[in-house]
Structures are given as structure tokens and as C-alpha cells.
Amino acid sequence: MIKALRLVLPAIVGCAGIIIFLAGCGVVRSENRQEQIHHMGHDVMPFDLSKTTHIFKMTEEGGVQRVIVKDSTASDQISLIQQHLEHEAARFQSGDFSDPANLHGENMPGLRELHAGASHLKITYTALPRGAEIRFETSDIRLQTAIHRWFGAQLSEHGADAVSE
């Protein structure tokens, strides 16, 4: 019995150590979804989310997404917003919604429909004095609904970084 214990005990202690080590590796700061999106946002958006506001306006034809700076003198942020939104508008028009999918997840409400129906969307970019906007227009009620669902999900997940207009 003692001989068996001598053989088994190191294995038990070793396993316990591994379990404790792995548990320690899994310690992650507890964040809600909005905090996660805020921290992960820089992976997709080159501008500083804390210095900007996303504005979502749902319209009968679809919607308008604006990103503007909080401080109108932040010309570096304005330039980054304009470059990013111009690039995104072109990608969205071709059906490429990979940036929102990378940030919010592949199952984000509305994304599949927008990707599949991109040829039925009119997407336009406009530079604004404090940022930029992307306008989404369609006569397809299913795509209008997809835009509204997509905007609603972004409003929810961006939290304090976004407002509805």
C-alpha cells in the first residue's frame, strides 16, 4: 500500500499543480460585452473610440451611420474616421461585412442578409466636418429590416460609445 502510494502521490500532486496552473491562466478581467467591444474596437477601427461617438439613425429606406469626434479640434481623429468609413463603405457595397463580423461576431443580427443582399443596397460615403457618415438605402423591406437590426445590435454593443438619432 505504501509502495503504491509512493507511485501515485507524485502523479496526484503533479496533476493538482497543473490544474491550479491552468486555472490561474484562465483568470481574465471580467468585462461586459460593451467593455469588450470598446477594448477590441481598435482591432477594426483606427480611431480612438473614447474620443468619438457612433450615431445610428434608422430611416424608412435603411439608415445612416455617423462617426464624429467629441472634440472638433481632433483633426487626427477626423482624418482616421474619414479614411476608415470611406474604406468600409466601399467594402460594404461589395458585400464585405467582415470588419463588423470580426468585432461583433459572425452571427450579428442583420449581417448575413446585408452580405447576401449587397447588390440591392445603395451605400454612400460622405465626409463631415467632424467625421464621416455611411448612408444605407434600399427598397427591399427585408434589407431595411436587416439594416435596422444591425444598427440596433451595434447600439447595444457599443454602449456609451454610440447613440441613436
Image (spheres, rainbow, N blue to C red):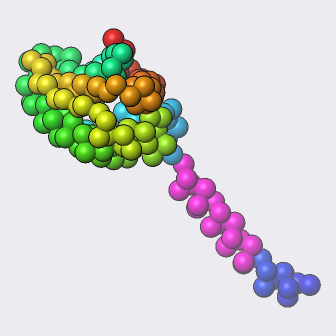
Give the residue furthest to the bottom: 3
Quadrant in the picture for the C terminus: top left
Q: Would residue 85 be visible to someone looking at this image?
A: yes
Above or below for 74 versus 99: above
Q: Position of residue 75 (x, y in %)?
A: 7, 25
Viewer-proximal residue among 44 and 164? 164
* Membership of 22 in magenta stretch: yes
Res. 78 image quadrant? top left
Viewer-proximal residue among 40 and 24? 40
Give the residue furthest to the top: 165
Q: Residue at x 61, y 56 (%)?
A: 23
Res. 47 image quadrant? top left
Q: Position of residue 49 (x, y in %)?
A: 28, 29
Left/right of residue 26 with respect to residue 102 in the rendered view: right
Left/right of residue 149 with respect to residue 61 in the rendered view: right
Q: Position of residue 151 (x, y in %)?
A: 39, 26
Quadrant in the picture for the N terminus: bottom right
Q: Residue at x 43, y 42 (%)?
A: 112
Q: Residue at x 28, y 21 (%)?
A: 64
- Which region of the structure is painted magenta? 10-27
Give the residue furthest to the front: 139
Q: Position of residue 114 (x, y in %)?
A: 38, 38
Above or below for 103 versus 153: below
Q: Would residue 42 be visible to someone looking at this image?
A: no
